[in-house]
Image (cartoon, rainbow, N blue to C red):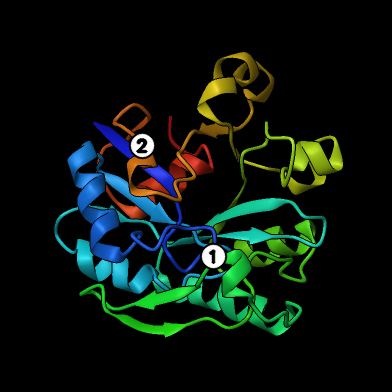
């Protein structure tokens, strides 16, 4: 079964995300685009994932996730079987990240929503900064609690493992990587040992993926998607 996905979407909790990126807007646009599975991956937080899951209930599968920035300024997408595990990861980040007050006039507001798209809070600590965790720590802790760490947009010239470290550390035993659509064809031959994801990194509703990228799985479930990212099934 082909399951069309976009596993890298930012809500308005990310200061760089448009304020129209509310739970229902994200879900409804994803449905209009023809997607089957999405992940909201805000910077160093999963604070809007519960609301997105509530808005999506029975309509589209939402894989709990977040985009973690390491001390090396490398972005790592982390996906989890449940929201509770994602919240465990966020707790670890909160205990380690530097407390830098957000400047909404510069970076944008960081908004929390309920399932009805009502604003229920605003994050005061700047989320687009280092989590205080190294890349090794992010991989280790995410895996410890059942998550799958995936280096984000590895082909980009900033905030990627290749741009900042120059290579994919073999000791990480990386099972999946994200490559942007523009470079996927030229780079996929170099990452045959990893499962390759291509998602939108959408910060605006119109940027959410069209139904282009898909996984072949037997049932649309968090379990099978995570297994795909560990190459346990083909």
Q: Could you tell which of marks 2 and 1 lies nearer the N-terminus?
A: 1
Identify the residue position indicated by label 2 in the image. Answer: 209
The mark tally for this picture is 2
Distance between mark 2 and mark 1 Cα atoms: 21 Å
Answer left or right for 64 relative to 60: right
| For discs 2 and 1, the disc positioned in front in the rendered view | 1
Please say whether residue 124 is visible from this viewpoint: yes
Residue 17, given in percent of the width and then of the height, sits at 47, 58
Instruction: Check disc 1: other Cα within 10 Å, few if <14, some if 14-19, many if 20+.
Output: many
Residue 73, given in percent of the width and then of the height, sits at 77, 55
Answer left or right for 152 relative to 169: left
Image quarter where the C terminus lies is top left
Element on which disc 1 rests = loop
Which residue is outermost to the front?
Answer: 105
Instruction: Check disc 2: other Cα within 10 Å, few if <14, some if 14-19, many if 20+.
Output: many
Q: Compared to 131, does 94 lie above or below?
A: below
Point out which mark residue 15 bears.
1
| Residue closest to the eye, 115 or 108 | 108
Image quarter where the N terminus lies is top left
- Residue at x 30%, y 35% (from the top left corner): 4
Residue 42, given in percent of the width and then of the height, sits at 51, 62
Residue 200, given in percent of the width and then of the height, sits at 45, 39
- Residue at x 39%, y 46% (from the top left corner): 225
Which residue is outermost to the left?
Answer: 58
Point out which mark residue 56 bears.
none
Q: Compared to 50, does 136 lie above or below?
A: above
Among the 4 quarters of the image, the one containing residue 71 = bottom right
Please say whether residue 144 is visible from this viewpoint: no
Element on which disc 2 rests = loop
- Residue at x 74%, y 79% (from the top left corner): 96
- Residue at x 67%, y 67% (from the top left corner): 141
User: Residues at badges 2 and 1 in contact (C-beta under 8 Å)?
Assistant: no
């Amino acid at each position: 079964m082909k399951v069309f996905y976009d596993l890298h979407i930012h809500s308005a909790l990310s200061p760089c995300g448009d304020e129209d990126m509310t739970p229902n807007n994200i879900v409804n646009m994803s449905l209009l685009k023809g997607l089957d599975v999405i992940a909201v991956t805000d910077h160093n937080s999963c604070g809007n994932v519960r609301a997105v899951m509530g808005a999506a209930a029975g309509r589209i599968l939402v894989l709990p996730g977040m985009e973690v920035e390491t001390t090396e300024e490398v972005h790592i997408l982390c996906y989890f079987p449940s929201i509770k595990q994602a919240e465990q990861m966020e707790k670890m980040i909160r205990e380690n990240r530097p407390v830098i007050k957000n400047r909404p006039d510069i970076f944008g507001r960081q908004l929390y929503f309920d399932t009805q798209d009502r604003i229920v809070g605003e994050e005061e600590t700047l989320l687009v900064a280092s989590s205080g965790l190294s890349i090794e720590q992010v991989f280790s802790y995410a895996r410890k609690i059942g998550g799958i760490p995936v280096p984000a947009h590895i082909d980009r010239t900033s905030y990627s493992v290749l741009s900042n470290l120059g290579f994919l550390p073999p000791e990480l035993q990386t099972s999946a990587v994200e490559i942007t659509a523009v470079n996927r064809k030229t780079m996929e031959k170099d990452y045959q040992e990893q499962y390759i994801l291509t998602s939108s990194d959408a910060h605006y509703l119109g940027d959410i993926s069209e139904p282009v990228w898909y996984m072949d799985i037997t049932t649309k479930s968090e379990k099978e998607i995570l297994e795909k990212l560990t190459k346990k099934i083909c």
